[in-house]
Amino acid sequence: MIEGPYFVLVVLGALGTGLVAGVFCGFSTFVMKGLASLPPAQGAAAMKAINVAAVRPAFMLLFVGSAVLCAVIAVVTFVRWPDEGAVELLLGSALYVFGSFGVTALANVPRNNALLAQASDTAEAIAYWPVYVSEWTAWNHVRTVASAAAALTYVLALT
């Protein structure tokens, strides 16, 4: 049974990964659809503003803090191996660290940087916008599922 400070870590891990899943789910289900419905120059400009606003302490603490917490949970789980829930905890940690944090770094951020590098009203940016929306959203679906699955596996480890 998971107890004491380890229990608190896992509860915080479930909460953090679940909150991040909710943010990503919002983008996948309605934010990107709303931005895509705007004229390309306006949609691109709005997304650029969102990307700048996202890199603020409140979200970054949640997003990066959850990744650090998941890594700590994985290390503690290895040290305590083969305690109850170890498989679920390692799976949850891997899902978030690789499927959410890693996908963000390798797929979503490079697309954000490419969008940011273009003036929103140029022909190049207008042509890139539908590609950006499609690719960014597809990778965001991956992040959403990975974050939600991480939260679920942490909860399952506690049961």
Image (cartoon, rainbow, N blue to C red):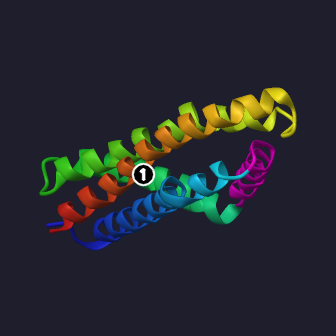
Q: Horizontally, is 51 left or right of 69 in the view?
A: right
Find out whether residue 65 is within the magenta segment.
Answer: no
Question: Depth check: 6 or 44 in front?
Answer: 44
Residue drawn at x 32%, y 64% as measured from the top left: 10
Which residue is tagged 1? 144
Name which residue lies at 24% across and 65% down.
Answer: 155
Q: Nearer the viewer, residue 137 or 33?
A: 33
Residue 126: x percent and y percent? 77, 34
Magenta range is 39-56
x and y percentages locating residue 89 in the rendered image: 25, 52
Q: Position of residue 106 (x, y in %)?
A: 55, 31
Q: Is residue 51 left or right of residue 95?
A: right
- Please give left or right for residue 104 compared with residue 41 in the image: left
Which quadrant holds residue 56? Answer: bottom right
Residue at the spot 84% in from the left edge and 40% down from the top edge: 120
| On-image quarter of the N terminus | bottom left
Q: Residue at x 40, y 47 (%)?
A: 96
- Relative depth, front residue between 105 and 50: 50
Residue at far top of view: 124
Question: Does 64 sit above or below residue 116?
Answer: below
Q: Dot 1 surroundings within 10 Å: few (below 14), some, or many (20 or more)?
A: many
Q: Which residue is nearer to you in this view: 62 or 122? A: 122
The correct choice, above or below, for 29 with respect to 128 in the image is: below
**In which quadrant will I find the C terminus?**
bottom left
Q: Main secondary structure of the magenta part?
A: helix
Residue 50 among those drawn in magenta = yes
Q: Left of 81 or right of it: where is 98?
A: right
> Does dot 1 land on a helix, a strand or a loop?
helix
